[in-house]
Amino acid sequence: METGLFGVIVDMSVLLWAAVGLGGLLVLPPLAAWLAGVRYIPNDKVGIVEKLWSRQGSVAEGRLIASRGEAGYEMRLLRGGLHFGFWPWQYRIHKTSLTVVPQGKIGYVFARDGRPVDSDQTLARVVECNDFQDARTFLSGKGGEHMCVGQRGRQRAILREGVYAINLALFVVITEDCVYRLGMMSQHESQMIDKWRQMLQAAHGFDPIVVGAAPIIHIGDPDDSRDAGDTIGVVTVHDGPTLDPGQIIAPPVGLDDNAMHHHSNFQDIEAFLRAGGRRGRQFAVLTDGTYFINRWFASVELIPKKVVPIGHVGVVVSYFGKEGSDLSGDAFRHGERVASGERGVQASTLSPGKYAFNDYAGHVHLVPTTNFVLHWITGRTESHKYDESLKSIDLVTADAYEPALPLSVVVHIDYQKAASVVQRFGDVKKLITQTLDPLLSAYFRDIAHKKTMLELLHDRDSIQAEARHELQRKFSEFDIELVDVLIGKPETQEATGEIELLLEQLRLRQLSQEQVLTYQQQCAASEKLKTLKMAQAQAEMQTDLTRSKVEIEIAKNRGEAELEQARMRAEQTVVDAEAEHRKHLLMAEAEGKAKTLLGEGESTRVALEGEAQASVLRKQIDSYGDPRLYAVSMVSKYLARSRQPLVPQQVFTSGAAADGNCGRLEQGPLSILIELLLAEKLGLDPKLNGNADSMEHALSNATTSQA
């Protein structure tokens, strides 16, 4: 049993020694190679050599990289492959990855060693060192020239996309993805580099500047987005000589024919500085394109292009340029106008279009050249916002009313006088608020003081015409043209209804006038209607009128036999003619007049007939010589026509004689008439008869009865 256990232990020992021997065979060659100074660097890495000791001692004070064989980090860099002679007791090899700058990105370099930068420098100058891959050339310079020696600190040169073998003991490369640096850095240095990286990320410094590639949305006006082509880049340089006293914008450089001064839109920093470029905000701007600019050297702000819309001109107030001479003349005492390129209000204006205008180097005042409306109406404004602070004009009338007058004014500015307007007033809005507003307010208040409220309402047209004429003259003094003045309805600030009451009175007055005119027209229409009716009646009664005329003629002919009847007919005809003439004027008056004339004619006819009959009777009586004879003649005519017998068959008599005798009866009137008739027939004298008185009495009675 013990023998078996011992055998097992022996077997395990053999296996252990065999494994150790095999491991030794695997470890001993690399270990031997390491001890022999052989080093292997993978192809995706580089080796940074650190000499632990040297007979030349350590690097000089203030230096980090050994350039003369001293102990410290060496300039040389080990690329992929086997390298010999690096004894482990003298050298330490730091393997780091290759530096990679992604496609379309920018890498920034910080040099830990080199000459110190000058006092007026912010960044280290650009030297030829194969994109920081040749540390020896960077530290020693090319050809030994002092200006070719690299400087420590942040570098002006940048790395474009690619893979670089860079000595990270000398350089720190900052990219968007990571920071390429040697791990043995101080905490303070690492924190500073991380801070730079954060600042570059916040400023999108790892991306190239792209002008005109994306829309820009203005702060405060999110709905106003411009197209990609409507942006420019304003450059602010953070390195180089400072500006001269009194300057706020760096002048453009590199515009001459010297190729060494062409800085390719701030991408060639050394050429920019050679051409005399200054630090600060630049007058020259970046237009559409892509630019690889070191953000440590210059920052770029994208702003919209200046757009001068149709119907406007742009008056340029330049903050940049030399001091110019006044072009406005000695008579104009409201500032100076200068030529293009000079500092001040430039006489030439920008016509409608888009301009790459640097807003930090000047300002463009848009002046409308088309007619625009200004409202002096509380709570109302146009889209141009020039009248947003205007309100209705407060008035006091002659009869102590206090209305608010709404007013609209149409204004035009000549494009050739736009610079003069800006020079005089600053801008269009100041012109309106500081000049036109008090001018119009004072003018209409003066008018209101002389007018009652009703006059102000009723005489609006004349007030408006007078205001147009007077204000056109005043506006022309300010180089602007007044097109028209439009006055609205005055309103009271409180709901007292006073103006409404006045308007109601005006409405009633106008209504009364209209009613008078209406009644006059109705009267005229009634007269025309009467004339029409009369004409229609005449047309309808034409036959009757013709017949009546014929009858009148017949009556005239008959009147010739009877003179008085003819006269009546003639007068009647005259009356009818006059009545017809009057009918054509007023129907009512004509009818009344016709009736009156007809009545007068009838009475005249009756009178004339009576006169004629009386005249005929008188002639007949005169022909008999004695009225009694005429009466006897008439009685005899009637008795001849009578159906009763003249001599009654029976006679009854009674009575006594006049003298009391019964021999002779008293005779009646009839008997007396008969006696007279018989006496005439017999040729006797009626007067011889003793009854003459009785006969005269009977004749008188008979005549009266006939009448």
Image (tube, rainbow, N blue to C red):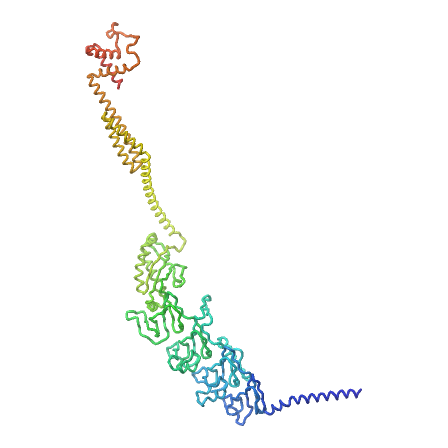
Residue at screen point 74% across, 88% down: 11
Which quarter of the figure has residue 402?
bottom left
Which residue is most to the right? 1
Which quarter of the figure has residue 521?
top left
Q: Is 553 located above or below residue 524 in the figure?
A: above
Q: State the count of labels.
A: 0
**Quarter of the image with the C terminus in it:** top left
**Lateral position of residue 136 relative to residue 491, left or right:** right
Q: Position of residue 84 (x, y in %)?
A: 57, 91
Instruction: In this rendered view, identify the residue nearer to me: 396 or 65.
Output: 65
Which residue is most to the bottom? 55
**Quarter of the image with the N terminus in it:** bottom right
Residue at screen point 31% across, 69% down: 334
Q: Position of residue 172 (x, y in %)?
A: 51, 83
Q: Position of residue 639 (x, y in %)?
A: 27, 14
Q: Is 78 located above or below residue 233 in the figure?
A: below
**Lateral position of residue 345 relative to residue 566, left or right:** right
Q: Is 383 located above or below residue 259 in the figure?
A: above
Instruction: In this rendered view, identify the residue nearer to me: 530 or 388.
Output: 530
Q: Position of residue 97 (x, y in %)?
A: 55, 83
Q: Is 290 located above or below residue 534 in the figure?
A: below
Using the rendered image of the protein, determine whether residue 199 is visible from the camera's viewpoint: no
Instruction: In this rendered view, identify the residue nearer to me: 339 or 247.
Output: 339
Using the rendered image of the protein, determine whether residue 256 is visible from the camera's viewpoint: yes
